Image: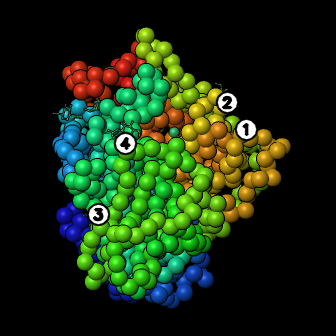
């Protein structure tokens, strides 16, 4: 394994430093084929795509082996025969990313954000996760990966696996069938907000040329209390359900604080060159309005979806969303502010301002004196000009008969004399048991899912190939925009609007021809979001708001797709060990240590801790 790891990392180094594709291909051919099985996936390549070209700064559209930006990622990907391997160890420690002072946090390999995972399109990614926490389980979700026929690797505890008990480890393995930018994060309660987060770069073709890949760039809100403490306050109806305000915004894991301590992240621009920056919102609560003074963004992809390029001064980036942008360094010299501010249009607030400094090579680094672009956005939008490069149409004729409603609602509840705040989808606030995931029910052929699992069956018959959902803010729900994330699929965003969706009044507004696709989309405050996806990936797929507090408060549903075809983990595999270890831990663990906040709540009485509403 060690040598494989070394080879994998060296190769990734080569591809990101952009030697020509032929050299890369030769390197790849010299690799030992790993034991990873290579059958079972469609490896159909359109012969017309097998043009001979070399991926490089002036030809980003092509890739290797005849694959290119014109390849349909949903049906074809390179068979590289290569596995990249990583080891992630999660530990309870302290961190001080903005110089304000040390606080408890949970880090992966001692880093914040955690190690960057890089692979090439078509590679197999294998990651061993070790839980060295004393008092928390964990599970790692590989955000945006489709997990085609590999639902047991999705990392959603209580749905696709048991949580990893303290001391346990698990090796995840899945295929990079798509390329672009993403992140991984804990799916155990609010744990990712305390640091269990890292970025992912999958090298592949692009819709516009660039010279230099700056890599992924994480933007997050940051609290001086822990994420568990913040969630407890948000959950406590005594504060009106409003989560506490974040204290700062970190860019690439750092920033200055209000008292001037800490450091800005700094990026060097090479004069005259085009730079690709991969922006990722890894926050727990905030949507960001992002810009770089004096430099518009040419957007070439969002989430894992390549786009017909468009240019904008501002991006509104919801939690979990990614934007791959090209910045042309045409100013010759100077220092420029990169800005990420909590976006009030999307109801986000924060006490900090996200800033980093972009400096031209040859200029002395100093605090910039530049001004932000005029005309910042005034609404909270799903970017309306985003046209996917690979054209995919949705059958409009199925909409009327197939579309179903999923109302999102909100309500304080009184439980044991405590006022607590809950979110519901279709009337249910999700609570799962991390020791009995949905896939376990499926394996046992037990259809008695607890109501709190909020299981929605999709496509029980083979004849239905698309599923359509109207996600609707219920009357009386607070007018908060929710970044809705779907596992296992890209959503086809047929439309969004204000008020109540009505097939009669709003059907004409829906876009069935090549609608925007992505894995996180906004449900507008007081409005609706209509999505569709093809039912081509058997599994149990969560759909949830990516505001960590809202997930904790139940804003989730799970689609049980083509149940009879779900690929289940083999009996006695590591997957079952994870469950055994978790259930032993649950049976024998000591009482939770008291949180500093003292805000620990009991709801419902059967659930020991709000934090076991684990998502
Ligand atoms: C982390 O360490 C703190 C301080 O020692 C402790 O209170 C807390 O329970 C630990 N958390 C976990 C998840 O192990
Ligand atoms: C996880 O750790 C946090 C922080 O120590 C603690 O507040 C919480 O109760 C723990 N939750 C579980 C389910 O172990
Ligand atoms: C972010 O920080 C890491 C670690 O310091 C660094 O390697 C990386 O280049 C930085 N990313 C950008 C885009 O500056
Ligand atoms: C953060 O901002 C809010 C509202 O602007 C303010 O009430 C609060 O005192 C601030 N908190 C801190 C720690 O500065
Ligand atoms: C099915 O699951 C329910 C809920 O966990 C459980 O009570 C029941 O015993 C299970 N049925 C079987 C046959 O295992
Ligand atoms: C929504 O909940 C109702 C009432 O429990 C149920 O009848 C309906 O099937 C649910 N909708 C979906 C799409 O599962
Ligand atoms: Cu939400």
Instruction: Report the Cα–Cα distance between label 4 and label 2.
Output: 28 Å
Mark 3 C-beta closer than 8 Å to ligand 3 = yes
| Image quarter (top left, top right, bottom left or bottom right) of the C terminus | top left
Task: Find numbered disc 2 in the image and state the secondary structure of the residue it sits on.
Answer: loop
> Can you say whether 381 is above or below 293 in the image?
above
Instruction: Report the Cα–Cα distance between label 4 and label 3.
Output: 19 Å
Residue topped by disc 3: 265
Q: Looking at the image, which residue is at 84% across and 43% down?
A: 504
Which numbered disc, 4 or 3, marks the residue that appears first in the sequence?
4
Q: Could you tell me residue 133's position as x and y percent?
A: 21, 38
User: Residue 92, can we see it?
Assistant: yes
Residue topped by disc 1: 500
Tell whether 194 sits left or right of 337: left
Counting other residues with Cα less than 10 Å from the Cα at mark 4, is it few (<14), some (14-19), or many (20 or more)? many
Residue topped by disc 2: 475
Instruction: Report the Cα–Cα distance between label 1 and label 3.
Output: 43 Å
Q: Could you tell me residue 482's position as x and y percent?
A: 54, 42
- Residue 601 image label: none
Of the four image quadrants, the one with ligand 2 is top left
Task: Find numbered disc 4 in the image and state the secondary structure of the residue it sits on.
Answer: loop
Q: Looking at the image, which residue is at 27% across and 51% down?
A: 257
Q: Could you tell me residue 382's position as x and y percent?
A: 60, 55
Which numbered disc, 2 or 3, marks the residue that appears first in the sequence?
3
Q: Which residue lies most toward the front here?
A: 369
Residue toward you, 166 or 388: 388
For the residues bearing labels 4 and 2, Cβ distance under 8 angstroms: no
Instruction: Report the Cα–Cα distance between label 2 and label 3.
Output: 43 Å
- Residue 246 image label: 4
Of tags 2 and 3, which is closer to the observer? 3
């Amino acid at each position: 394994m060690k040598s494989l790891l070394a080879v994998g990392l060296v190769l990734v180094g080569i591809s990101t430093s952009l030697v020509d594709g032929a050299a890369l291909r030769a390197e790849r051919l010299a690799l030992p084929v790993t034991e990873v099985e290579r059958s079972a996936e469609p490896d159909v390549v359109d012969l017309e795509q097998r043009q001979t070209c070399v991926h490089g700064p002036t030809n980003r559209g092509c890739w290797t082996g005849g694959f290119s930006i014109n390849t349909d990622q949903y049906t074809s990907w390179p068979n590289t025969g290569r596995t990249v391997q990583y080891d992630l160890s999660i530990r309870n420690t302290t961190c001080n990313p903005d110089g304000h002072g040390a606080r408890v946090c949970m880090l992966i390999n001692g880093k914040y954000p955690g190690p960057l995972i890089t692979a090439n399109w078509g590679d197999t990614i294998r990651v061993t996760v070790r839980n060295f926490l004393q008092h928390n389980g964990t599970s790692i979700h590989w955000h945006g990966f489709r997990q085609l026929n590999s639902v047991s690797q999705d990392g959603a505890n209580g749905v696709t696996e048991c949580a990893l008990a303290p001391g346990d480890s698990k090796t995840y393995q899945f295929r990079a069938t798509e390329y672009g930018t993403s992140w991984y994060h804990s799916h155990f309660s609010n744990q990712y907000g305390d640091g269990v987060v890292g970025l992912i770069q999958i090298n592949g073709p692009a819709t516009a040329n660039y010279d230099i890949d700056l890599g992924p760039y994480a933007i997050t809100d940051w609290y001086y209390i822990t994420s568990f403490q913040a969630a407890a306050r948000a959950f406590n109806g005594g504060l009106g359900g409003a989560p506490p305000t974040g204290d700062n915004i970190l860019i690439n894991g750092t920033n200055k604080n209000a008292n001037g301590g800490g450091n800005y992240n700094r990026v060097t621009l090479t004069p005259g060159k085009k730079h690709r920056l991969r922006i990722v919102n890894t926050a727990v609560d905030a949507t960001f309005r992002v810009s770089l003074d004096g430099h518009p963004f040419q957007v070439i992809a969002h989430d894992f979806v390549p786009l017909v390029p468009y240019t904008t001064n501002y991006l509104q980036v919801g939690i979990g969303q990614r934007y791959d942008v090209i910045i042309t360094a045409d100013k010759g010299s100077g220092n420029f502010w990169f800005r990420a501010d909590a976006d009030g249009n999307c109801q986000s607030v924060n006490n900090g301002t996200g800033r980093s400094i972009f400096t031209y090579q040859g200029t002395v680094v100093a605090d910039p004196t530049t001004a932000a672009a005029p005309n910042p956005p005034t609404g909270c939008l799903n970017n309306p000009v985003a046209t996917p490069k690979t054209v995919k149409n949705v059958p409009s004729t199925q909409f009327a008969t197939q579309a179903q409603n999923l109302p999102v609602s909100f309500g304080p509840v009184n439980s044991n004399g405590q006022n607590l705040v809950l979110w519901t989808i279709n009337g249910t606030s999700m609570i799962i048991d991390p020791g009995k995931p949905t896939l376990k029910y499926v394996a046992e052929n037990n259809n008695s899912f607890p109501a709190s699992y909020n299981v929605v069956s999709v496509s029980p018959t083979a004849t239905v190939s698309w599923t359509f959902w109207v996600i609707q803010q219920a009357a009386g729900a607070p007018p908060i925009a929710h970044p809705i994330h779907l596992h296992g699929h890209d959503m086809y965003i047929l439309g969004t609007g204000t008020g109540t969706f009505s097939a009669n009044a709003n059907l004409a507004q829906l876009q069935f021809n090549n609608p925007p696709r992505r894995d996180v989309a906004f449900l507008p405050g007081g409005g609706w979001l209509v999505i569709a996806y093809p039912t081509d990936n058997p599994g149990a797929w969560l759909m949830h708001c990516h505001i960590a507090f809202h997930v904790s408060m139940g804003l989730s549903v799970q689609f049980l797709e083509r149940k009879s075809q779900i690929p289940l983990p083999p009996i006695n595999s590591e997957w079952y060990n994870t469950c055994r270890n978790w259930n032993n831990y649950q049976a024998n663990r000591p009482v939770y240590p008291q949180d500093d906040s003292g805000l620990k709540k009991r709801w419902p009485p059967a659930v020991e801790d709000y934090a076991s509403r684990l998502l």
